Amino acid sequence: MSIFDRIGTLKERLDDRLGRRFGNCAVCGKPTRSHRVGSRLQCHTCREADDYPVATDGGRDIRERVETFVANHPDVGAMQVLAQLDLAPDQRELVKDIVDESRDQDDSSEPVPRFEVPVGEQCCITGCHNRRLYPHDNSLCAECWDGEPPETEPVTVDDDLLAEAQAVAGDPGPEREDPPDPVLPPERFQDESDDEDDASSVDADNLLAAAMGDDLPTKEPSEEGSIPSTTSTGPSLAMPTSALPLGQLDAMAPAERRRAARKRGLEWPTTDEARDRLFETIAEVMREGDERVVDAPTSLGKTYTVASTRWGARDEITGDNQVVHLLATRDARDEAVEVAEEDGGEHFVLEARHEACPVAAGDHDPHPESDDDREVITTEGEAASEWLAHKCDAKGIPFSAAHRYLEDHNDQGAELPCSHDGECPAIQQWEDLREGDHPLVIATHNFAHVPGLRMGTNLVFDEEPDFVQDLTTDRVRDAVAAYLQAIDAPVTSWEAFVQLSRGDSWGDDAGQEREALKHMLDAAPDREWYFEEPRAHVMAPALARAIFHAEERSNGRRVGKTPYEPPRLDAHAHDDEGWNRSWVTIVLDDQNDVQTVRATPDLNLCRSVIGLDAHPALPKWQANTVPHMQRTQVLDPEERRLWRRYERGLRVVQVGTATRPLTKGEYFDDRGFRAIASQLRGTYGERFRTAITAKSVEDRVASIMNEAGVHDPKTMHYGEEKSRNDFADEPIGLVEGVIDPGDDHVVNLLAELDLDAKPERSEGECEHCEGEGCRKCLGTGQQRAHGRGFTGEDADTAREILASVRENHVAQAAGRYARNPDDPDSTATVYVRTDAMPTGFADVQTPGVVWTFGQKQDRIVEELREAAEPLSARVLADRAECSKEHVRQTMRRFEDEDGDHDVQVFESVGEHGATLYAATGLPNSGVVDVGSPTEAYGSIYTWGLAIRDPNPIETDDDQPDGPASAETRTFWEPLGGVDPGGTGG
């Protein structure tokens, strides 16, 4: 570098330290630190040249500016040119023609770059085209650095976390973080729009609300006070800027998008290619007889792949064994059956008792109002269907055993109507399965307990199974006490049994009783006991053994696990060891209350075990299948995210930064949800009509949507969203809040897996026990720390368990939209009003509900909206019954908002020079900022510019000092300038 270049560089650094702005030249588009001409930046070259004057309106000047900018940015889109050069909307066609001409002139598929180093990666010094040292826009190159570039120490990170982070924000290079910028002064990073009025105090109530995951409460200002300003969420965690040019890719046609991406070494599979990889992954696990969860994004076709494959012709994969496809719900099973009937091969469907047996379905229950000749079946005066449901559901008795008992003990002494033509269909289906040749069996998850479906088969769980039993502490106590009495145990009460099992009794007699009880727990009552004893349960013997042998685990939990063989169901059953085995696990707290009872079928006799899940949580899969279950991915994080965006057409918008737990519904933000529902309805009209939320607030959500103009809204709640296609064709969706399982759910599963992690605690005393230790604080006497953190050796697993309920349910809910990647018109934008999402799942983040109105503001807005002409602050204050200052500050607040809700202000045009205000689409409940997706290609929504050009209100000629001509302003909101990156799918 010459001495003159060095002097120029030092001068530019001095200019920067003096506060001069940095940006792109308004003429050529290159990065510049040079002089400002009017309101625009120009580099030295363009400032001194007469060929490129800065133009403000049409003509040859704008064409030259656009041509110069496009030449330096060959992949730029028309909307981005408009934003970067600050052109008026009416120049869009001119810009589009110039962009098209520029691309038509390039006959090759690989355009020749203008510089050896792309503009976006060049040194920030004007005229220097060397590669910058660091990814951020203000980085120098090695040659321009003053002295030797600083060195940073390499940091060792987990490979999986590194891959996830690189997919979210691009590969930032070997450095852990960027070094301090030696050029820019500190004030360069300050927000110039900050105002002293933005500061607001945060009291204890606000902190509590924030800790619970809710927004800070909106306070009604006093008459003489000021309106609280918009609450800023502040910067999120520091993350490197995405290296992927997603903003540009969004605005391109599919073919052009792939070509542009390849130039940057960026590729993603087509839907057909991704589905081929999905099948190969499933086939490999099955071929090798392995046990793995296949991690594939929603809508890729996991269910379709298994149900449509002709497994009978794939012996090299199946080992000439059955494939058993188990789904979470009957609706999901029926969809798989439809696929198998249309595209698959030979298959067999197993039905539930009330589907196959008319007696269990209630077809033969007594109906006094019916006068037909139906045959009625009861037992001990109880309807047959109700009796069967109680025996099977409340006592755990297999349906086949209950059905046979009913045949012999019904009040009518008759043959059951379902057996007139042979065996009951619900029982006969097992004989049909055994005698036929069925390569594929389709059923629901509960059929995994049937031993014939596990013996040497290829078992496929579609979605994560859950074998937790619905047994309360009282129910377990009753069943165990009844069992102890039935076997004549030395102790027959729950309290004495638990005390003896824990070794709390003293003396030789206690030791002898304990040893005697240990051997007696292998005994089983006779068959009649299960039917005739009201407190009986088929798992009572196993529960007693598990409790007796329970051992201490973390967080004051005791865990017992034991094998047991329940009454057998199908005709395959025989007495070989392990044939009909399941595993019963019970988790007790320090008060001997039952926390969890899990009955997991023994899958060790399966040839292979395959899980299908879009967001698998390994700890839960391991608890419900086999302890050594592992995960295998179909797409890497970057491919997965790009496939979702550009092949499937699903965009996810995070609204706000609050978590919003809604498990019990007490933290539901009624006013905030009303504001956002009104905003979405006003923006999208009838295209917005669906929402997914927690069951506790589902009815309230539907009611508010109806009040906002969504007639007959369709809703879904967490827990029923998996494998559902109800919203597959909906273009706009809203996901409200999240369900939080609480700490008990996490620590119970940690204890079950014999892991050690504890909820993070603060130094304050527990508010429930005043530091003495209780169930709420897990005996620590300390208050739960704000947030949902965990400490200990297995804290990461604890967070994964928590995410399996919160983040994974949210991702599954958003995945209910845009379910047909084969159809380019099947796209959707889903607004998610919680920050509990998998890392990088959101494509865009928006502030959401910025401001909800108080009572006085409601009145002011209502009066202004209903007014036929502009009103002064005094008139508004009289009508709304508040102070004039309150009106002024409310109007000033609207002026400060950058959305579509601003009022129009006419200064000095009213009586005595008063300022008049007029409504131009004020919202009903509050100000909401959810961005503005605009169509750039086809029906794919991309994030571009929100253009607002409000029409002026006509003023009367006799108004004093009125403006000669009402000029309107156009607001440009760059909503997609920085892409946050991500991996979700």
Image: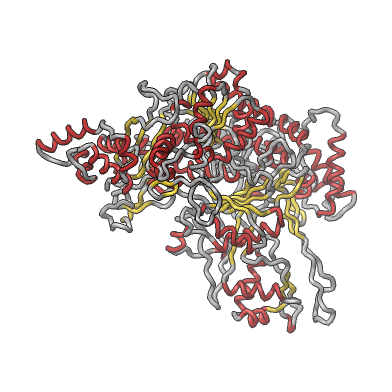
**342 displayed left or right of 155:** right
Quadrant hosting residue 251: top right
Q: Residue at x 49, y 42 (%)?
A: 359
Picture coordinates of residue 504 (x, y %)?
A: 17, 41
Q: How is the image coloured?
A: secondary structure
Viewport quadrant of the C terminus? top right
How many marks do you count on the picture? 0
Residue 52 lies left or right of residue 226; in this view the side is right
Q: Is residue 274 above or below residue 723?
A: above
* Left or right placement of residue 775 versus residue 815 in this view: left
Residue 300 is at least partly visible in this image:
no
Relative to residue 963, is residue 285 depicted above or below?
Answer: above
In front: 303, or 558? 303
Q: Residue 916 at what x, y percent from top left?
A: 72, 76
In the foreground, 779 or 966:
779
- Residue at 35% across, 51% down: 762
The residue at the far right in this view is 60
Q: Is residue 272 left or right of residue 402?
A: right
**Residue 742 location (% of width, % of height):** 41, 49
- Does residue 137 appear in the picture of this structure? yes
User: Dividing the image into 4 quarters, which one contains the N terminus?
Assistant: top right
Seen at 20% across and 38% down, the residue is 488
Find residue 972 and report its horizontal and vertical position in percent.
73, 55
Q: Nearer the viewer, residue 816 or 405?
A: 405
